[in-house]
Image (cartoon, grey):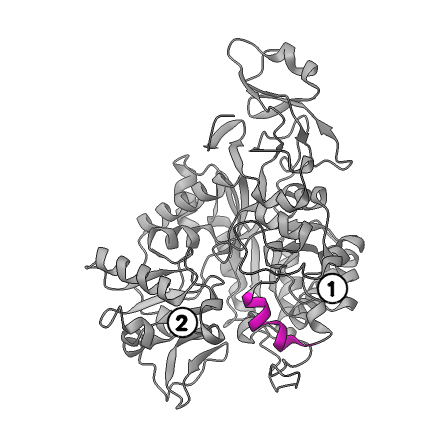
Amino acid sequence: MPHADLVFTGGPVFTADAVRSRASAVAVSGGRIVAVGADDDVRELIGPGTEHVDLRGRLLVPGFQDAHVHPVWGGLDMLRCDLRDGETEGAYLDTIAAYAAAHPDAPWILGGGWGMSAFPGGTPTAAALDRVLPDRPAFLPNRDGHGAWVNSAALRLAGIDRHTPDPADGRIERDADGAPSGTLHEGAMDLVRRHLPATTPEELEAAVLEGQRYLHSFGVTAWQDAIVGDYGVGDDPGRAYLSAAASGRLTGRVVGALWWDRAKGLEQIDGLLAKREEYRGGRFAATSVKIMQDGVAENFTASMLEPYCDGHGHPTDNSGISFVPPELLNQAAPLLDELGFQLHFHAIGDRAVRECLDAVEHAIARNGRNDHRHHIAHLQVVHPDDVPRFRELGVAANMQSLWAALEPQMVELTLPFLGSPRDAWQYPFGDLLRSGAVLAAGSDWSVSTPNPLAAIHVAVNRVSAPGEEEGDYPPFLPEQAIDLATSLTAYTAGSAYVNHLDETGTIAVGKLADFALLDRDPFAGPAEEIGATSVLQTFVEGERVHAAGDA
């Protein structure tokens, strides 16, 4: 056998294969893995032109894959007014004021990333924003993308006042007199968003590359972009991906999930087919359809089987919003499935989860079983009766496990309004695993950090990772914890399965050489330190795409 291009020795190596085998050495030639085993198994493959990386006891894993992420929007936020690092209203206002001063000619102040827990009720006000932005309009979505902070200039420009009705798929936060107070929820964001200046193709491609750089820094080599295509008045990253792919600058593998417009019906399917044909090139292919079935629990738009509580345990008359009527969903899912699309659902509430599972059941009844690998993301509240249906229907559970921890947003804005027993049905990863469901994993960045090790820490410990803590809380529903090997596998082989990237996800001979080199072996230390692990180097097809230090 000729000499290898790249060799790793001095393992351990986590292969993520079916038996969780461990090795200490890997050899790569032509972008593919040609040997996996002990150090002695690869020594004869090391020649004068071979790059030899001594792992020195640090863990080599398959490249992480994020099964639900928004890296272009995250990249735009990083290039604009980036609020991710703030924790208080004062800190946010300081950042906004500094950004505005540095960009005096910008007609709008755009960016985002604020956390709901910094504001009473999770709703910032226009009055506060007016103190630093009295004249120029501002539109600043929060971390989860389900609400936006706007100032009075933006409200005036959009013509929003006390007489403006709430849209069917959203809500205008109001003061005691009915006037808009400065937070727009869900579809109400579009009332302002339609007035924003268009993002240029150059800005979108810069955002693709910035988002890719950031994901690679966390060992992420492939991802599913959870909104591509005609997203209302939002930015479509599809052509930016194609441009980056054509120029060779797209080093990550990307599956695009085309947006299902909840304001339309089955007539949009022809457009989705056209987009699927157009958005295919290099390492990018838009082969999935994203259906957002509900909102989020914090603003009471997650779709629930029973009404929300009022915070004192008493039921209200609000059980959230099912954005796509179930009867339409049950028609659309079989048609999309028949046309070969993967279905990628957003479901937070237990009613939304059930409606998505029902839709897949309708697809199977019409078309039979296939290999489209439909998946439901988020899964915050799952009724126990629906847990075994994931395995029965072949629906993958797409976990955002970073959220399965107690923190102020959960304690103050969620638990009091869910009530018992529903508060104990959250993020049931352990039950899903025990039921035999396929587990995949993602971050939903820019909603939260794209760091897989932080999410894996929470999956194992059910407490926030080091550096992510927002208070001293006990483990959240610890019976739903999963072990380290299972969580690592979900973030590698599981997400590769969902992404139909079957030549990746495990370290095995013949697979593509996508790797992440960690700064330690988290199996060798206490579980409480998993989240302190960082990524030193990232490889795609044996080419280094990120380096943080000497390996």
Question: Can you tell which mark lies on residue 420?
Answer: none
**Label 2 sits on residue:** 190
Task: Give left or right: position of 364 versus 413.
Answer: right
Secondary structure state at the residue bearing disc 2: helix
- For the question of whether residue 66 can be seen, the reply is no
In the image, is 277 to the left or to the right of 205? right
Q: Is residue 205 above or below residue 149?
A: above
- Count all numbered tags in the image, as a single digit: 2
Position of residue 41 measured from the top left corner of the image (x, y, whole percent): 70, 15
Residues packed near mark 2 inside 10 Å, few (<14), some (14 to 19) or many (20 plus): some
Q: Looking at the image, is mark 1 or mark 2 nearer the viewer?
A: 2
Q: Amino acid at mark 1?
A: Glu
- The residue positioned 27% from the left and 74% from the top of the image is 153
Which residue is at 26% across, 68% downward?
Answer: 132
- Name above or below for residue 136 compared with residue 272: below
Within 10 angstroms of label 1, few (less than 14), some, or many (20 or more) residues?
Answer: many
Residue 452 location (% of width, % of height)? 57, 46
Circles 1 and 2: CB atoms closer than 8 Å:
no
Q: Amino acid at mark 2?
A: Asp
Q: To which quarter of the image does residue 88 belong?
A: bottom left
Residue at the image point whose x is 31% and y is 73% from the top: 151
Q: Residue 361 bears which disc, if any?
A: 1
- The picture quadrant where one finds residue 315 is bottom right
Is residue 307 something that shows in the picture? yes
